[in-house]
Image (cartoon, rainbow, N blue to C red):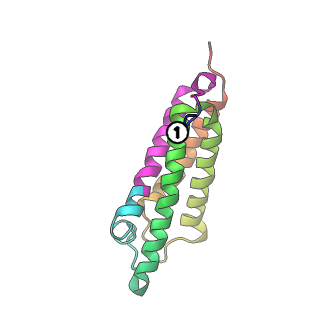
Amino acid sequence: MAFLPPSTNGQYRGAPVSAAFLGLAAVLTLIPGLIHSFLPDGGAGVIAGLDMGDRRALVIGVFRWEGATQLALGLGTLVVALRYRPLTPLFLALVIVERGLMSLHGWVLSPPANGHHPPEHYASPVTVVLALVFLALSLRPRRT
């Protein structure tokens, strides 16, 4: 028995560029996952500009936990983009939900008290718009 079932890419009828965008989204999820998991402060200070004060260990722990979830999601998304493209619309919808919630929290519900937005706060709304476009393209059958 193989670790992964055979590829289903031949069954995908949406735009190939949508699967490519999903692959890019996967890589752009894996990079912060690696940063949060392995940078000495998880990126909390050097990237997000957080003053961790006396809760440094807690903040770094939360960043590492987030990094672990980003690595798992990014790897799963990359596998879909490379081997199981019929799932592209579903995973693009998940990108929209994830990044939409990140945007809502980062800009509306709980913006940073110090006014400093980490790079992800700017990238997330852009990603939502792009993912919506590529989701629409992934749902349209290719012309033969």
Of all residues shown, which one is farthest toward the bottom? Answer: 54
Q: Which residues are magenta?
A: 6-33
Q: Is residue 123 covered in magenta?
A: no
Up/down of 11 relative to 106, above or below = above
Q: Could you say which is closer to the camera, residue 128 or residue 34?
A: 34
Q: Amino acid at mark 1?
A: Val
Name which residue lies at 33% across and 69% down. Answer: 40
**Majority secondary structure of magenta residues:** helix
Residue 142 % position (x, y): 62, 20
Residue occupying image coordinates x 58% and y 31%: 85
**Is 33 left or right of 94, judged from the image as shown?**
left
The image shows residue 127, relative to residue 105, as above or below, that is above
Compared across the picture, whether 34 is left or right of 137 comes to: left
Question: Within 10 Å of the Cα at label 1, are there few (<14), some (14-19), or many (20+) other Cα atoms?
Answer: some
**Residue 60, image x, y percentages:** 42, 73
Residue 144 image-quadrant placement: top right
What residue did someone put label 1 on? 79
- Give residue 50's quadrant in the image: bottom left
Of all residues, the one furthest to the front in this rendering is 1
Q: Is residue 17 magenta?
A: yes
Q: Which quadrant is home to the N terminus?
A: top right
Left or right: 35 as drawn, with respect to 73: left
Measuring from the top left, give residue 82's x and y in whole percent: 50, 33
Q: Position of residue 114 (x, y in %)?
A: 44, 77
